[in-house]
Amino acid sequence: MKMTGEYTLYPARWLMLALFSLSTCSNAALWTTFAPISTDASTFFFADTTSYVAINMIALLYQIFYLPGTIMASVLVERAGLRSAVVAGTALTAAGAAVRYTAAHALGGSATSYAFVLCGQALCAVAQPCFVNAPGLLAANWFGANERDAATTVATLFAVIGNAVGQIMPPAMVSSDSEGNVTGVVSLLLSQAILSVVCLLGVYFGFVSHPPTSPSSSTEERDKIHSAGKLAASSPPVGGEPTQPLIAPSASSSGLMSDDSSLVTIDVTVASSQNNNSRALHSQASVLTDSQRADLHSKYGHVMSAAASLLADRNYRLLLLSFGLGLALFNALLTVLNNILSPCGYTEDDAGGFAAALIGAGLLGAAVAGWSMDTYHNYRPLLKGGFTMAAATTFALAACVRADNAAALYSVFALLGLFMIPMLPVMIENSIECTYPVSEELSAGILFAAGNVVGIPVTFLMQYTIDEGGDGACGSFASPVNLLIMAVACMCSLVVMQYQGPYKRRMLEEAKEERRKTAAGAGGAV
């Protein structure tokens, strides 16, 4: 065991991170199984090569079921802890993967097996929020103050790694001959099912919600606040529970805070809202017993007031609009990438390679962005710069989508990933800073929900523009699908340029540190 001051860090934290990350990767890999092999998948299930909408629907289920899955994951964490959510997520993923494999193995390629594959995919889709929403909670429960950010980054990026695996494995394992016979689909689904079952076994026998003792002072204080919230919930004052603003008036989004009184107001509001809003403490729930979580169940009504306070904040609305459209564009692009490139003669193997280049460069960019935020706290410049460069790169993409131009496309997709994927942690950090002290999970969760909901019509619209352009769209800078991609990217960039969110959390921390130094200096003088 490692000691950090008076707190103990248990070696098992690395096992928890590994189990969670691999389970996240397993679930994410199932998302885009058929996207990079849409032509072969269409042939396998429907004996034709044009049923793209049906094949795209398999991936779209992850977006359709994101909101229901989020509700399920939140209830599980609130009432039974992080372990219950992660076990449920891995169990649903394994069950869904098993259904997909069984359907393809027993029924072969047919519309009936496609229907069962959809059912299995739905189970996997419901499980996704159990992983995507939980990295911060895992890190806070197990890792010390100097390790939390790294743990959160690793756990988050394994979802992206899973997407990369989902883009690379299918083209490598599935092939078709000149007569239209598709092979390798059953083997692909079997390998994914085996990985999912292995993750389920590891999580079931090895994963726990939290260590015996808190790993940091903030986690310890968090537990004390939960206890205070329980007492307040069990004995509300006459006339009902008091309602507290989740964002102090003096810390509104109109600009940066510039005086200590504003900081004190936020500090008081934090304590007040934490004592009266269990949902704002969702990320802390796993350290409580089942009976305590049941006691906090009556506090769910405060979620609506928290959400209302977020939507009333102009800066948050700008983040919501830009991230919602940006995530929708990214998901849609991965889903229909093969369909965009096939008119130019690129194979499904090529599409998988381009997607891997996008995600691989994105992981590198995310690591650099995380280091930059941790070192310089330059949240707004990174956000605006990343969105602007991503929008500019879509113009390069439109110019490079033509036949026999693979080298240029690899470079452009790498640049696109380099600028787009880091916006995930950068956007989350900006939302936390500008909405503090509202629950971090709530502010980020609304962003993710918006991106997944908007992604559904964007994907259908992108496929429609591909169909409208036909084979003649290859090499055309102004093809319908290129115009759509560039328009959405530019809209996101223009919206985010108006964002001027304050760093509320950073300013509070700096003010507290300054007061501590002042008090220490005064004590030394005495």
Image (cartoon, rainbow, N blue to C red):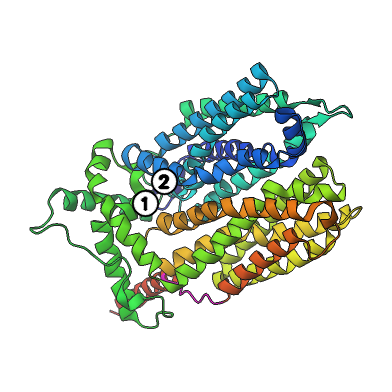
- The residue at the far bottom in this view is 258
Question: Mark 2 — residue?
Answer: 141
Identify the residue at image location x=52%, y=52%.
453
Q: Position of residue 476 (x, y in %)?
A: 84, 62
Amino acid type of the residue tagged 1 in the rendering: Thr
> Is the Cβ of the residue at disc 2 closer than 8 Å to that at disc 1?
yes
Please, what is the dominant secondary structure of the magenta stretch?
loop
Q: Position of residue 195 (x, y in %)?
A: 62, 28
Question: Mark 1 — residue?
Answer: 219
Q: Which residues are magenta?
A: 498-504
* Residue 339 left/right relative to 114: right
- The residue at the far right in this view is 404
Q: In the structure shown, which secondary structural element does the residue marked by tag 2 occupy? A: helix
* Residue 306 left/right relative to 44: left
Q: In the structure shown, which secondary structural element does the residue marked by tag 1 occupy? A: helix
- Give the alpha-carbon distance from disc 2 to disc 1, as whole Å: 7 Å
- Taking the magenta stretch, the answer to whether it contains residue 500 is yes
Q: Quadrant of residue 490?
A: bottom right
Identify the residue at image location x=74%, y=60%.
480
